[in-house]
Amino acid sequence: MTTVIKIFGFLAVCALSLIPAKKALHMFQQNRYEFYRYTSWLFRKSNFRPSLTLILILFFLLVGNVLKGDLGILLCSIAALAYAWKLYQDEKKQDYVKPLVYTARVKRQIVFLTVLSVLVYLLFYRLRPCLGFCAALLLPYLLIYPMAALTLPLEKAVRQHYENEARKILKESPQLKKIGITGSFGKTSVKNIVGDLLNEHYYTLKTPASYNTPMGITRTVREYLKPTHQVFVCEMGADHVGEISYLMDFVKPTYGMVTSIGPQHLNTFGSLENIIKEKMQAIEKLPADGVGILNVDNPYIRDYPLENKVRTVTVGIHNTDADIVGKDIDYGENGSTFKAVIKGKEYAYETELLGENNVMNCLLAIALALEMGITPEETRKYLKEVRPIEHRLQKKIINGYRFLDNAFNSNPVGCRQSLDVLERMSGKRVIVTPGLIDLGGSEYQENKAFGAYMKGKADFVILVGELEKEALLEGLKESGYPEEQILCVNSEKEAFGYIYTRFTPSDTILLENDLPDAFLK
């Protein structure tokens, strides 16, 4: 009977660790499989239940020392299984913003984590059964580190294999016109607008969604690029030094664009100077016969001392010395109108896209389309047919209520411009936001300024989560925003529940930024 009890006890140890291990993997994925981000999350917010965890640890140690043998293991097992069941039930009730995605990488991690966990828990369990139960409570989040270290060589090999295949496919497509688009913000919107404009003339492939990493681009090339494609529009993202340079060497585009530069990902870039230099590699690394498209309203782009003598086309709204200038901008509930001055001639445009930020995105796309042989008259026609970009100031109806979905636009400039759009909407104007993240040392001040900017733009403010609440509230308070028109909630689900009971379908709700679960609590 002793052997059966011991086996039963060890199975209870493993069961106790299952939900914490799943949560650890989930958060590791949401933190981009990076030790730095995961560690920051782990120390910012514990996922343990301190009081109950401490009680259980004391219980296991007490029972293990007082009731040695089968009875002690049995009592610990019952307590462990009861708590494991509670964790499972709690997990089922969780309404995650971004659930764990079981990619091939995660499946490999599960195999390694399972083997590693069994070995570690078995070691503790054989020393003393009570230590095995304690380990199952304390170690799941920490075992991510050795698991990730063990799988790193395998992940590098898998990534390199697929990337080599993608490089070969691109090399075997010499007639393919390749476009690289980067920027601190706006790159996904511009990519989609460019793709829609060019697709009227060329069989065009664009990287889907936010596939802007080496693996995302690799997947796009391997799975979607066909010999019949004439143009490849490639979004290039970066949050570390060297990543744009790497992607430029990978894709080798002839056309490069920098949509904007700002203090995004300061935690990983280290400085604004690093961001500027890295983003501008999209122009610096173009071939001699290439063309660069630049937003010269952005001072970091305008003032950058470009070393590559490649031909550039500049675009501006406030900078009237640009090659293409936007003017007479107007926008409301149904879209935007503007004029573009191209080679001294004015062209009037209409689009469903909202706000000045989207007008700049349109102008950048128009500039590129003109370089690709599309006439200004054709761009006017095609731009009318461009649909709003998903989650980027996208007007939509949810359960009969009118929303401005700006969930994927999380930079200080874009957030303020979304409030400018909200200001022009009819009915009561509501903003739902968790604030801005990844801004390094300026994060508090940027969120404080964001909160202050809400006055006069929004009639009601709903703040989600704890991370940036203090800074946002300070900005709101200093601006004189009425306290009774501010609500703080823990989740988007709570926010939506309040909206559906307090406001009407004639009101407008701005959803500004959509943080993953790792940042909300």
Image (cartoon, rainbow, N blue to C red):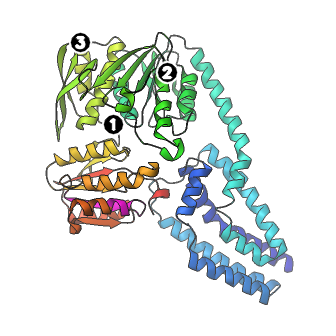
Q: Are marks 2 and 1 in contact (CB under 8 Å)?
A: no
Cα separation between marks 2 and 1: 29 Å
The disc label shown at residue 343, or none = 3
Check the image and report above or below for 82 versus 266: below
Closer to the chain start, of discs 1 and 3, is 3
**Residue drawn 49% across and 14% down?**
176
> Residue 153 appears at what percent x and percent y?
73, 41
Q: Rate crowding at label 3 as few (under 14), some (14 to 19) or many (20 or more) other CA atoms within 10 Å.
A: few
Residue 26 lies in magenta, yes or no?
Answer: no
Q: Earlier in the sequence, mark 3 or mark 2?
A: 2
| Tag 3 near tag 2, CB within 8 Å | no
User: Distance from label 3 to label 2 (Cα)?
Assistant: 26 Å
Judge the density around disc 2: few (<14), some (14-19), many (≥20) Cα neighbours within 10 Å.
some
Q: Nearer the viewer, residue 47 or 12?
A: 47
In the picture as drawn, the residue positioned furthest to the bottom comes out as 66
Foreground label between 3 and 2: 2
Give me the residue at 71% from left, 35% from top: 157
Per the rendered image, the range of residues in magenta is: 459-472
Residue 370, picture quadrant: top left
2 or 1: tag closer to the N-terminus? 2
Mark 3 residue type? Lys
The three-letter code of the residue at mark 1 reads: Ile
**Residue 389: numbered disc:** 1
Q: Which quarter of the image is occupied by the C terminus?
A: bottom left
Q: Amino acid at mark 2?
A: Glu
According to the picture, the residue beneath numbered tag 2 turns out to be 284
Q: CA distance from mark 1 to mark 3?
A: 29 Å
